[in-house]
């Protein structure tokens, strides 16, 4: 039976929107001032994708069916596919109890699958973008730093084994550890915030297909992905020219496959929450951008031992209770939520660390750090994580 409020034409759009949110760092306006010969101009990703014929994009591999993930190889780069994302976010605490939420996205866009030989050292077959955002608890606003560089003359690139991806002086690499419990090293910074972290996976990689969120073959969406939903982090944060020792918990998404174009009439909200007692909750909610119809949620609870419990639409209550209107774009976003799974006796409120966390003017995406408070089975529970939501279309009454 067809889900109420959603016609059959919406399912193909879920393909693009799910990939868009997972690869949110890719679908954005790349804005970075001139940095010398390695700098790119400032085209949008959509503009680059529209150059498919000139760039030879049709030669890239496509994800057409599920395949078992292979580690340590799949921690590294997949240059045969056009797009790839390493996305990390988490919460850090310093020695004085200061709390910080960060997100770092490193994305690769392949320009040509079979480029002709070129003599120039500046000839590039890919571009890399990195964006670091930081929110300090009880302080408004978002700090950020960016990199955008061609894969030329060693300025940016990615290796398969051992895994390493870098953009100028930023890099993420696997240092050692078991293939299913890797240790990684992260360095990212600049004129804004700067991070140096050692990361240790507390759980084995979890294929996105095993979460049961999309209700179908993951290959249908042109995407292969896995999560490392809980990595212990120890390192240094530099903020306002002051160095602080920090520790905390980090979540890593790694995805590769076919890139989407932004747009369409369907929105998606994604909730990635690290809870007490080594549990993580990942939810997706498909909705119409104009607010009509009935939103369709799906959730997966990852237990301490890595086992997954999946929940579908009728087992979930998910409603926004606060919206935020961007003063820059006029876009409206649902930013605070109540989430309930009655079968678990779970009730959560998800509240943003700060309201103004619009990720990009061009895509109209809100990607924000949130804190979670609530109850599970009658006991208090807390956590932290991120919500990513595409903009709503305001009705005649406005907000």
Image (cartoon, rainbow, N blue to C red):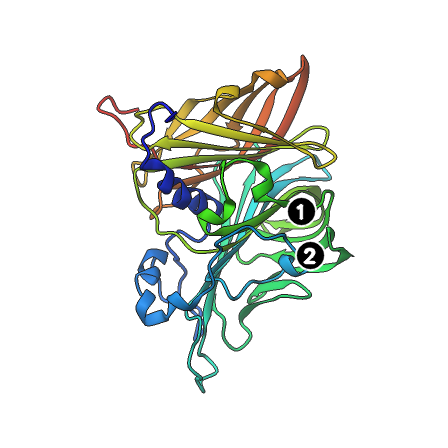
Q: Which residue is mark 2?
A: 71
Q: Residue furthest front?
A: 1
Label disc, if present, on residue 238 of the rendered structure: none
| Residue 23 visible to an observer of this rendering | no
Q: How many marks?
A: 2
Is label 2 in contact with label 1 (beta carbons under 8 Å)? Answer: yes
- Expressed as whole percent of the image width and height from the top left, the position of residue 327 reads 32, 36
Q: CA separation, marks 2 and 1?
A: 9 Å
The residue shown at (74%, 55%) is 179
- Expressed as whole percent of the image width and height from the top left, the position of residue 86 reads 56, 53
Location of residue 234 with respect to 118 vertically, above or below: above
The residue shown at (42%, 46%) is 20
Location of residue 173 with respect to 321 vertically, above or below: below
Q: Quadrant of the N terminus?
A: top left
- Expressed as whole percent of the image width and height from the top left, the position of residue 196 reads 66, 54
Judge from the rendering whether residue 160 lies leftward or rightward of residue 332; answer left or right: right
Q: Quadrant of the C terminus?
A: top left
Judge from the rendering whether residue 124 lies leftward or rightward of residue 274; answer left or right: left
Q: Residue furthest right?
A: 177
Judge from the rendering whether residue 369 lies leftward or rightward of residue 263; answer left or right: right
Element under disc 2: loop
Question: For mark 2, does the 10 Å Cα neighbourhood hold few (<14), some (14 to 19), or many (20 or more) residues?
Answer: some
Q: Which residue is mark 1?
A: 205
Mark found first going from the N terminus, 2 or 1: 2
Element under disc 1: loop
Location of residue 384 with respect to 127 vertically, above or below: above
Question: For mark 1, does the 10 Å Cα neighbourhood hold few (<14), some (14 to 19), or many (20 or more) residues?
Answer: many
């Amino acid at each position: 039976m067809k889900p109420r409020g959603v016609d059959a034409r919406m399912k193909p759009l879920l393909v693009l929107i799910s990939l868009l949110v997972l690869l949110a760092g890719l679908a954005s306006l790349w804005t970075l001032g001139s940095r010398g010969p390695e700098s790119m101009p400032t085209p949008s990703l959509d503009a680059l994708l529209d150059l498919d014929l000139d760039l030879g994009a049709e030669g890239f591999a496509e994800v057409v069916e599920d395949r078992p993930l292979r580690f340590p190889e799949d921690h590294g780069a997949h240059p045969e596919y056009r797009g790839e994302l390493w996305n990390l976010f988490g919460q850090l605490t310093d020695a004085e109890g200061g709390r910080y939420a960060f997100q770092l996205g490193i994305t690769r866009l392949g320009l040509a699958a079979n480029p002709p030989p070129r003599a120039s050292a500046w000839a590039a077959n890919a571009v890399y973008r990195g964006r670091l955002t930081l929110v300090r608890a009880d302080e408004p606003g978002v700090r950020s730093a960016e990199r955008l560089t061609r894969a030329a003359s060693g300025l940016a690139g990615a290796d398969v084994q051992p895994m390493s991806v870098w953009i100028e002086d930023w890099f993420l690499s696997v240092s050692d550890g078991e293939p299913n419990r890797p240790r990684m090293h992260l360095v990212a910074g600049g004129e804004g915030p700067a991070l140096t972290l050692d990361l240790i996976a507390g759980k084995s990689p979890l294929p996105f297909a095993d979460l049961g969120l999309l209700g179908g073959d993951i290959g249908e969406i042109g995407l292969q992905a896995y999560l490392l939903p809980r990595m212990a982090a120890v390192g240094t944060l530099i903020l306002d020219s002051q160095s602080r020792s920090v520790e905390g918990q980090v979540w890593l998404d790694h995805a590769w496959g076919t890139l989407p174009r932004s747009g369409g009439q369907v929105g998606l909200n994604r909730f990635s929450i690290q809870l007490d007692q080594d549990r993580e909750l990942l939810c997706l909610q498909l909705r119409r951008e104009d607010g009509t119809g009935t939103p369709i949620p799906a959730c997966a609870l990852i237990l301490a031992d890595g086992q997954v419990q999946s929940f579908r639409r009728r087992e979930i209550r998910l409603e926004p209770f606060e919206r935020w209107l961007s003063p820059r774009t006029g876009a409206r976003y649902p930013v605070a939520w109540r989430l309930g799974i009655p079968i678990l006796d779970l009730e959560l409120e998800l509240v943003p660390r700060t309201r103004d966390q619009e990720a990009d003017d061009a895509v109209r995406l809100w990607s924000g750090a949130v804190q979670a408070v609530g109850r599970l089975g009658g006991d208090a529970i807390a956590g932290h994580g991120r919500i990513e939501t595409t903009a709503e279309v305001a009705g005649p009454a406005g907000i």
